[in-house]
Image (cartoon, helix red, strand yellow):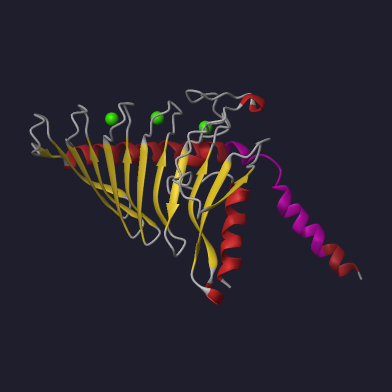
Amino acid sequence: MKRSVIAALAAAGLVSGVIACGGKEQAAIGTGTSKVSPGGTRDQSKWPVDDKSMCDWKSKPELQVSEANGPGALKPNVRRVYKVVGEGESRHKTLVCREIDTNLDGIKDVVRTFNAKGEAVHEEADRDYDGKIDLWISFVDGRIAQEDIDTNGDGKADVWKFYVNGQLQRIRRDRNFDGKPDVWEIYTRGKLERMGVDDTYDGHVDRWDRDEVMKYEAEETEKKTREAMAAAAAAQKDAGAPPAPAAVDAGAGDASAKKK
Ligand SMILES: [Ca+2]
Ligand SMILES: [Ca+2]
Ligand SMILES: [Ca+2]
């Protein structure tokens, strides 16, 4: 039973080829970019022997390793590491780690670990392919709980996102890159509700900015109004044109159906 579930999971992972990392942006990056990690190359025939594996398996002979080719890969770029657990009848293989070379340069750039239930536990990724990890994701019960992001390439997180039941609740930002947050954002149902700003960088909020939030919302509303007006204007322009083909088709269909 469990075995088939694992097989299905493995197949699903193989089809997608990219770890769906909770952040949707992950899929967008990848093979489309021309950026190459240090030591890597886009020439798949010249991929380095050392792919900078991030799964911990080399010194653990009890683990089983499988290599697979994702979309566009002529050589394996997806590694799955399995552990055999249980005894007798309940003995089965479980996925403990999966890592992928998403931009096909021969260097692994995203890794995810799993618990015995098959739920994601942790993920790390080098999303700009500079050889340094810039994204760390923690999962609780298989759902995203915390996402730490390095935006200035110093190898240290400066944006921290917190999720509850898979939904964004808070973001902390470190604008001067001293390792400490100086902007606090509170979200309700995924919408920015309140923002606290520490202008003096002493770790304390100097102002709670509903104004900033309201300004942002006003801009959004204005944008939507503009779009709606543009759409209305376009519709008006089309109003003089003959009726939409769909309406014509529907009438013709009725007529032919009645014919017999
Ligand atoms: Ca890579
Ligand atoms: Ca990086
Ligand atoms: Ca940083």
The image position of residue 155, as x and y in percent, is: 31, 30
Which image quadrant: the C terminus?
bottom right
Direction from residue 6 to residue 135 in the image, left or right: left
- Place residue 204 in its image quadrant: top left
Residue in the picture at 33% in, 60% down: 165
Which image quadrant: the N terminus?
bottom right
Direction from residue 153 to residue 93 in the image, left or right: right
Residue in the picture at 34% in, 26% down: 153
Residue in the picture at 22% in, 29% down: 175
Q: Residue furthest bottom?
A: 89
Q: Is residue 245 above or below residue 76?
A: below
- Place residue 5 in its image quadrant: bottom right
Q: Which residues are magenta?
A: 236-254
Q: Residue furthest right?
A: 260
The image position of residue 197, as x and y in percent, is: 15, 36
The image position of residue 68, as x and y in percent, is: 63, 45
Q: Is residue 121 above or below residue 91?
A: above
Q: Nearer the viewer, residue 199 or 87?
A: 87
Q: Main secondary structure of the magenta part?
A: helix
State the count of labels. Answer: 0
Q: Is residue 95 magenta?
A: no
Q: Nearer the viewer, residue 100 or 210?
A: 100
Q: Is residue 248 magenta?
A: yes
Q: Is residue 212 above or below residue 178?
A: below
The image position of residue 158, as x and y in percent, is: 26, 34
- Place residue 222 in its image quadrant: top left
